[in-house]
Amino acid sequence: MRRADGVGDATARKILMRHGFAVPDVQELAVDQSPFARRIPARRAALRRGVTLEARTIELGGGHFTNSYTLRAEQDAGYVLDAVSDSGGFHLRDALVDPAVVGAVNGSFTFISDDPDYQPAEPHFDLCVRHGVVAGLPSATKPALLVRGSSSVARTVRAEGVIRVGSGVLPWAGAKEPGGRVLVFNAANCRVKYLDSDVTAFQRIVEPATNTTPGAASAVDAVVEVRPDGRAVVIALVPGGGADLFTGGYVLRAHEQDARDWRVGDRVVPLTVDGTDLRALTSATSLGPSVADAVVPQRIANAYDDSLGVSPFRGVRYPRSLVYGTGDGAVHLRIFDGAPLTSHFQGLTPGEVVDVLAEEGHDLRWAFHLDGGQSSKLAYRHDGRAEVAGSLHYLVWPQKDETRFRWNGLDGRVLASCLVLREAG
């Protein structure tokens, strides 16, 4: 996956000063991000016809606050909400290279660890359709954005459907769901562990020896690789389970009787997901839970677990990213900014997100969380320039024998997916 290199301290200080942040020592940002705890003036800017950017500070009480940035596109402005993904990784500003894109927000949850030598072949969790190619299937029922050309819809998608392996067609279900003669495992089934670190306080790792499908004497696991030409093929068969979750794009498990005709090299064609013809989709991505569901632990326990390490939906303030609509059909991409190493500017809890959107009159059932924390970022084009908001405190952690952090606030975290507003047609 692409690496975020960052810039040297002197260059970082100059760029930050141009953005209004006085940072005397970039290395100190690893323990103190208070220079970014700054309230912003309310403003509203027209980016293109029917597309506006709104920015304001939201007070949370007790001196705590967040800065809100919202990209809003009117229903009749001629834009479509699209899902963009790349297993090799990219920065959010890269999405603006396409002149048809007016703005973008970071996408849904993807694999993150601090071990560059052990990464999944497909970091995108669950449903992923990339340029009409099914790169990933969901292991749990979740909301998803489904795009057909210039039309898109966000809805809950059950982790079930029909798949062809070789010449046989079987029903499939996500590994976290009951039923299904074929079970789907992917990187969302991995377990991230946190270890202490003298330099970065903690490190996120996955142990290869335990990063496998569970053992099952009567099962056969087929590791599926999605190739650059879009064909998905079986690259390994593992009787009895124990297939490495990171080797292919996903793993299919069947009873040995159903898998008796499976062969290495078989073509794999996912046909449907929750009644939707996958071959009709131009793009798709799983989303986070709805704003309403995120505050009810039992509603999301099955879908958001060890694969994320520490749950992002505890009652803790984090930067948050959202996508939602309104009754008049307008689409919103929104972030609530914050920096974790500050005392009063850390973001919102899931409950505070509910309060803010409810007060503004939005339907909480049709507002969805995206990946939050240091992934939260909004990019947009204004007066011919690429601008960004959110996570400007972002530092690239030292790699292996390095000891110094590198600032990379304009680009931020390397992403595997994002949502974009682009011109239709």
Image: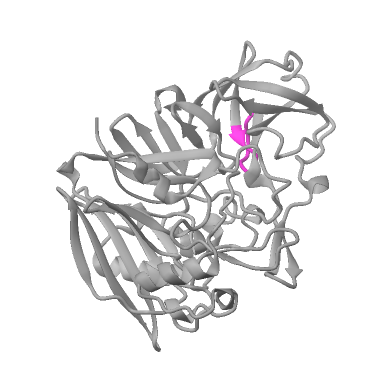
Position above or below: 326 against 262: below
Answer whether residue 178 is magenta in the image.
Answer: yes
Can you say which quadrant of the picture contains the N terminus?
top right
Provide residue 125's location: percent of width, then percent of height.
57, 44
- Which residue is at the front of the view, 40 or 143? 40
Q: Is residue 98 left or right of residue 23?
A: left
Provide residue 107's location: percent of width, then percent of height.
45, 49
Point out the stretch of residues depicted in magenta. 173-180
Provide residue 330's location: percent of width, then percent of height.
22, 50
Position above or below: 138 against 235: below
Position above or below: 3 against 86: below
Q: Is residue 215 left or right of residue 230?
A: right
Q: Main secondary structure of the magenta part?
A: loop
Q: Is residue 410 left or right of residue 190?
A: left
- Which residue is at the front of the view, 57 or 34? 34
Q: Residue at x 77, y 41 (%)?
A: 212
Q: Is residue 170 left or right of residue 401?
A: left
Does the image show residue 330? yes
Answer whether residue 144 is magenta in the image.
Answer: no
Provide residue 377's location: percent of width, then percent of height.
42, 58
